[in-house]
Image: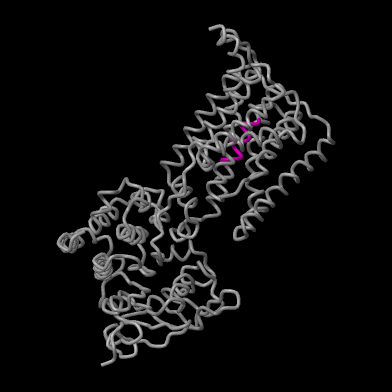
Amino acid sequence: MSKKTNEASTGNTVGKVGSVSANWDHLGKKGDGPAKNLLEVRDLQVKYGGIQAVRGISFDVPEHEIVTLIGANGAGKSSTLRSIVALEKPAGGSIRFEGKEMIGLGTEQVVKNGITLVPEGRRVFVNLSVYENLRMGAFLRNDELQADLDWVYTLFPRLKERSWQAAGTLSGGEQQMLAIARALMSRPKMIMMDEPSLGLAPIIVQEVFEIIREINNMGMTILLVEQNANMALKAADMGYVMETGSITLSGAGQELAENPVVKEAYLGKARN
Amino acid sequence: MDFFSKNLPYLLAGISVGGQYALIAIGYTMVYGILRLINFAHGDIFMVAGLVTIYASTVMPLYLSIPLTIIVTVILGVTIERAAYRPLRNAPRMSVMISAIGVSYLLQNLALYITGGLAQVYPTIPFISNTVTIGSATTKVVTILTPILMIVLVVLLIQLINHTKVGMAMRAVSTDFETSRLMGINVNRVISMTFVIGSFLAAIGSILYFTNYPSVIPTSGGMPGLKAFVAAVFGGIGSIPGAVIGAMLIGIVENLIKGAGWTTFSDAFTFVLLIIVLLFKPTGLFGEAATDKV
C-alpha cells in the first residue's frame, strides 16, 4: 500500500469512525471522568520450570491510554501479556482488571471480561477466510455483528476486498491488520498487542502505528509490547522498560524516549 | 455386459461396505485433524456399539435399542477422550497414542469379560435386512441404504463444518489451540464435539455393518477399524472427502477382488494398493502438504 492510499484510508476512517463508532460509546472517552486504572498488575511472577521469566513486576494501565512495555528479547514482556490472558499460570502476584482479580480465571473468562490479545507473530487462522477469522474474533458474542464488520472493513479496506480469501494467502502486513481487526471484533475494553511490528516493512509498521493511535482515539485502552522502542514510545502515554524480568525504568512515553539510558540501550542513538 | 452382470453383486457389496468404512473413517480423520492423534480405540468403540445393540435388543424393542446404542456410543467416545486423552493434552504425541492403544485393549478385554468370549448373535433388524433384487444381484436393503445414508450424513457434516459457528471453531482449533482460546473458544468443548460426531457416525456404521454378519465378538472391531483407518490415510488423513473416497475405493476394490475369485488375498490386495498410492502420493489422495505461512 502506498503512502498516499494509507493517508487516504486513514482520512476516510477518521471521517467514518464518527458515524459508525456510535456503538463504541461503551468505551467512553479520555477525560470523561476522573482517570482510573483499567488494569493493575502487582508483584506478578512467572516461572518456567526453574527459570523466573517475570520477577515481581507492578504496573498500571490507565483507561483510554496507550501503555507500552519495551525491552530486549527474553525480558519477560510476552510472558507478562500471556499471563494476563491466562495462557501462562503466574507463580504469584495479582492482575486486577476493573478491580476484578483475573488470576485463576480461564482464558475464555478473561476475554469475556473485555481483555484481548493480538498475539506475537499474528497467528491468524490460515485455513479460514478473512471473514471467518473476524467471526472467530467475535466468538463470544451473540449479538448482531454487521455494524462492527462494516466498521473494521472501513478501518482496513484491504480486508474487505479479500474477505473470502484464506487468511494464509495474505501478506504479512495484511495478516497483522487482520489480527488487530479480529481482536476488535470481540468488543474489548482493552487490547494488548505483542510485537505488532515484528517482521514488517517500515512503511507497514508506520501504518500499524497509525491504526493503534486511531483505535486509541476511539477510547480504546492499549497495552503494547514492542522491541521497536522508538515507535512504541512515540505513540505511548506511558512506558515501562523491562530487563530480565523486572521493570527498571518507567515514565511518560516522551520522557522515556529522551532518557539517555533508554536512548543508548534501545533507540540506537549515542548519548549526547 | 456379461462382465457387469457377473460383477454387479460384488460392486453393490463394495459400495455398501465402502459406505460403512467411510462412516468409521470420518471418526479417525476428524480426531486426527484436530488432535493429530490416531484414535486406535475407534474400531473398538465401533465393536462396543455392536454389543450394545445386541444386549439392548434383548430387553427392549429395536426402535428403542437403536437410539440407545447411538447414545451409549457417543457417551463412550466422549468419556474416553476425557479420561484417556485430555489429561495428556500437553504430553508428547507418542504418549497419547500409547494411551489410545491401551484404551483399545481395555475395551476388547472388557468385551471379552462381559461376553464370556462367546460370539453374541446380532439381532435381525427388520426392513434393512429384507432382500431386494437389482438386475442380476439379490441383496439386503442395507446394501442400498448404506451409501445413501452415508452421503446424507456426510453432506450434513460438511455443511456443519463449513457454514456454522461450531464448524468454524473446529477448523480454528485444528490450526491453533492457543489462538482459539484467545478468541474465547472452549477448546476442550470443541474436541469433545469431534468425538461426539465421530462416535455417532461409528454407531450408525456399526448398525449397518453388523446387520450383514451373524454375530459380534470382542475383536470384531479390529478389521473394519483397520480398513477404515487405511481408508483415512489413503484419502489423506484430516480430510473428510478424502476419507469417504478412500473408503469407497477400498470397499469396492476388495469386493471386486473377491468376485475375481481371489478372496484369500483380498485384504492383502487392499494393503498393497495403499502402499502403491502412498509411494506416489505420500500425503494420500486429498492430503494437504504442510504449506502454512509463518
In the image, residue B128 above or below residue B203:
above
Please identify the quadrant where the N terminus of chain A is shown: bottom left
Question: Looking at this view, is B267 or B251 the one in front?
Answer: B267
Q: Is residue A135 left or right of residue B114?
A: left
For the residue pair B38 and A267, the one nearer the viewer reads as A267
Q: Position of residue B71 (x, y in %)?
A: 63, 39
Would you say B7 lies left or right of A71 here?
right
Residue at figure coordinates x 41%, y 41% from the top left: B163
For residue B120, which quarter of the picture? top right
Residue under the image location 43 percent in, 50 percent down? B291
Q: Quadrant of residue B21?
A: top right
Image coordinates of residue B46 in percent, x first then y, are 67, 36
Check residue B205 for magenta coloring: yes
Q: Check if residue B97 falls in the magenta segment.
A: no
Rendered position, B33 above or below A100: above
Q: Which image quarter is the C terminus of chain A in?
A: bottom left
Q: Which residues are magenta?
A: B197-206
Q: Main secondary structure of the magenta part?
A: helix
**Residue in front for this viewpoint, B31 or B9:** B9
Q: Residue at x 37, y 69 (%)?
A: A193
